[in-house]
Amino acid sequence: MHFVRIDTFDQWRSEARRLLLAETAPSEVSFSTTDDQLSLFASEPNVPTSSGQRGAAAASVLKVPREFLALAETVACHRGTHRWELLYRTVWRLTHGEPQLLQISMDDDVHSLQQMLKAVTRDVHKMKAFVRFRKLEEASSPQASYVAWHRPDHRIVRLAAPFFARRFKAMHWTILTPDESATWDQTQLRYGAGVPASESPDGDALEALWKTYYASIFNPARVNVAMMKREMPVRHWQTLPETELIPELLAAAPARVAEMIENNEGFAQTAAHYMPADTGLDSLRAAAASCRACDLHHCATQTVFGEGPPRARIVIVGEQPGDNEDIAGKPFVGPAGQLLDQSLARAGIQRDEVYVTNVVKHFKFTTRGKRRLHRKPDSREIFACRPWLEAELAAVKPSSILCLGATSSQALFGRDFRITLSRGQTFETEWSRRTIATWHPAAILRMPDAARSQQMEQQLVDDLVLAAARPGKT
């Protein structure tokens, strides 16, 4: 067994190259970091690299896909202790007869790498969103400097720091984290040791201005405390000055919403005005047929309501009906619906077992000659139609909800949701404990890259399987 201590991606890359040249199988290597407890055998020398061991494998070892190197550099920032073994096992397989391994999303190693990639990418996004600089005034220097303290889940400082250098390039700033720090002097990024939270500044004169701004953009009509805590994890609240305002803003939200409705501030009329007393699906469907809550009913042929079993375990939510659906009065009967049917079949699900609907019930389009081309519904139209979707979900009470595409995902998760970052993950919403976002079949059909289209279709099938899984089986 070879024991190798690794702390950085560059170290891993160098050691992996030596191990591959020596034809050292993954089962014969144990990686550790300086954070790990020292192994009894940690002082053993690394793998020998005599020329005699560099056989014919050397040439093939160098043919590592560029895609893998980019993936590995990001995964290396994950805090998981097994990341180095996983990366080495993957590069070993890539160079030993499985050059297309990364295209197999169902492979356990590839799946683990993708999950780590998502976690690191999401953590970088959180750092960009939740870093709050505090201004430091020093009598000895005419130049103000700004300092922020942040606690990321993973070692992402070097991934996120270039973003801050671009955005705040005219500032002197430092970002402190427990593992590492980054400093920008308007010309160069430098990295240093980590710093505990106790050494970070407490506040500054700009916080009052920031709180005023936050209060002004707080939308009481979109309050969802569970979603807010998920998007703004409580562990970051101690460094976010605006969180002091949240209890007060939440308490005032109902009165502010009433005032907004009274003044028609973007609300006007919604489908709630057409909601019947009987909230069963048949009654809802009949009432929705005469909905005039937005202007889409003027041009659409008819309302396209959801359809499926009243007690379906799975509800699939799309964006809006298309040209074929508008004429037929049924959801997902066009090309995208056919691809959805094929994917359901591949996932072992019958179409008549699921309830299928859309966020918006009328077809929005623009004409080009005799053709009616899809147009994405705007936020006003989505908001006006939302009561129908909420009534459907309340009536069906599904075990799982599968959102197809960005519009339906953002309708249920919030406008900050990004399907490219969180596709295939299970979240709890007020309508189901298992709410999942995936690709819209129309997006798969429009994808010009055949390989990518095939991959997205497979991911749609995977997400359908995930949605159909019984609780405790995933």
Image (cartoon, rainbow, N blue to C red):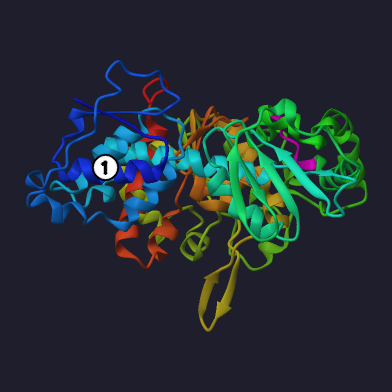
Instruction: Left or right? Give the position of 95 relative to 88.
Output: left
Tag 1 residue:
16
- Which residue does the image show at 25% across and 54% down from the upper left? 64
Instruction: Name which quarter of the figure residue 167 lies in.
Output: bottom right
Q: In this view, does 137 lie to the left or right of 442?
A: right
**Which residue is the extreme one toward the front?**
140
* Magenta stretch, main secondary structure class: helix
Q: Does the magenta stretch include residue 140?
A: no
Residue 392 in percent (x, y) is at: 59, 38
Is residue 367 in view?
yes
Q: Which of 20 and 63 is in front in this view?
A: 20
- Quadrant showing the C terminus: top left
User: For this rendering, which residue is in front, 187 or 449?
Assistant: 187
Q: Mark 1 falls on what kind of element?
A: helix
Q: In the rendered structure, which segment of residues is drawn in magenta?
A: 221-226
- Residue 288 position, x and y percent, is 65, 48
Residue at the farthest bottom position? 369
| Residue 287 seen in the current view | no
